[in-house]
Image: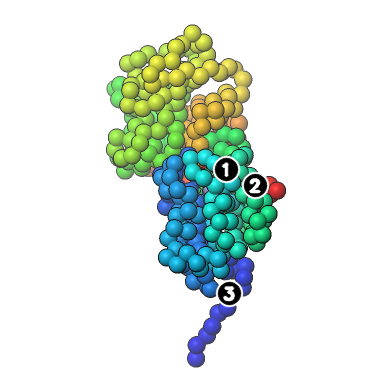
Amino acid sequence: MFKYTVLSILEEHELYISRCIQLGLQGTFSALPNPSVGAVIVYNGKIIGEGYTSDYGGAHAEVNAINSVKNQELLKKSILYVSLEPCSHFGKTPPCCDLIIEKKIPKVVIGTADPFAKVCGTGIQKMRNSGIEVITGVLENECQTSNKRFFTFHQKKRPYIILKWAETADHFIAPLQKESSSSYWISNIYAQQNVHQWRSEEMAFLVGTNTVLDDNPSLTTRNWFGKNPVRVYLDRNGKIDNSFAVKDTSSQTICITNQTELQNTNNVTYAFADFDHNLPEQICNILYKNHLLSVVIEGGTKTLQSFINANLWDEARIFISDSILKTGVKAPVFSSFSKSETKIIYNNNLKTVYP
Ligand code: AOF
Ligand code: ZN
């Protein structure tokens, strides 16, 4: 005996939107700062075309999915599933909405609205005005999470913030005094490679003054591959001279300082902040103005703790080693999480408003 399972319409929509998310995730880092979207075209219960966002500046998911359909006539009787509202504006590419209307696709199912001010519901409206049936909000949270950097940036007007540090089993991030000028390693080379991969994935890496002075980090991807992130460091009193690695020419750097006389160079831009009031908020504004959709705060404790205290963080990636220091610089602490058991913690709350 065969058993047939008939999917309800809702389950069917969720199934195809899940596939869109899966497709979109393949372009997460190559599409940045654009969101990476997935699109699926379904005719008569079968997928006849698929696509996801090309590298930054390239074709959008819907265009790639539509172009992948061999028999373009079938588009007139198909459903287009897409994890993000099709765009309605001329950016680096023309509006996806116009192509969908031109191809006479009768029905579009959307995961979530686009929070980008130039789109933000106008894509949905334009398609509805042309007589297309538009369904919205299928697996909405999952679709937003799949582009968490883009959604955080546009909804909260700040980058997606990842806290990162390594601590000993007894919760120290460094010894009190180092024996040599090189940095003291709590985690291992595998963790280091992991971090270098994250540097290739996120748009900015930020460190406090003491971390620059003590460790002289270069914040590059040298043990991985891919582009270096924008380096950001705090230097209230202008203590960091040109001999430090964060100021070398291997990538772009933003120095956040109180010293208004500092002059920009080819690769170092100075941004000014009042270090005595709401520094994490001011840093977020500077990163937002520089169109940086994500940042990893790489230390040290004072800087990390200031972001925790301001509740300005989305994710914490903590390496916990089995070594014991007995004394040292204390690791940051969360007031409301038990981090002893959790290595990656999410603190995210995204919300969409429909037109
Ligand atoms: C879509 N499908 O696959 C993506 C969309 O400069 P452009 O033309 O590449 O447009 C960038 C904006 O388009 C981006 O900020 C976001 O609002 C939307 N991204 N839209 O219809 C896609 N990646
Ligand atoms: Zn588009």
| Residue contact between numbered discs 1 and 2, judged by CB atoms under 8 Å | yes
Read off the residue under disc 1. Answer: 89
Say left or right for 262 vs 11: left
**Kind of residue sitting beneath label 3:** Leu
Helix, strand or loop status at disc 2? helix
Residue type at the position of mark 2: Thr
Ligand 1 within 8 Å, label 1 CB: yes
Residue under label 2, please give it: 122
* Pick the front one: 177 or 232: 232
Residue under circle 3? Answer: 7
| 10 Å crowding of disc 3: few (<14), some (14-19), many (20+) | few
Q: Position of residue 9 (x, y in %)?
A: 62, 70
Horizontal and vertical percent position of residue 49: 46, 63
What residue do we see at 58% from left, 74% from top?
A: 7
- Viewer-side label of 3, 1: 1
Q: Is residue 263 left or right of residue 160?
A: left
The CA distance from mark 3 to mark 1 is 36 Å
| Coordinates of residue 280 in the picture (x, y in percent) | 57, 27
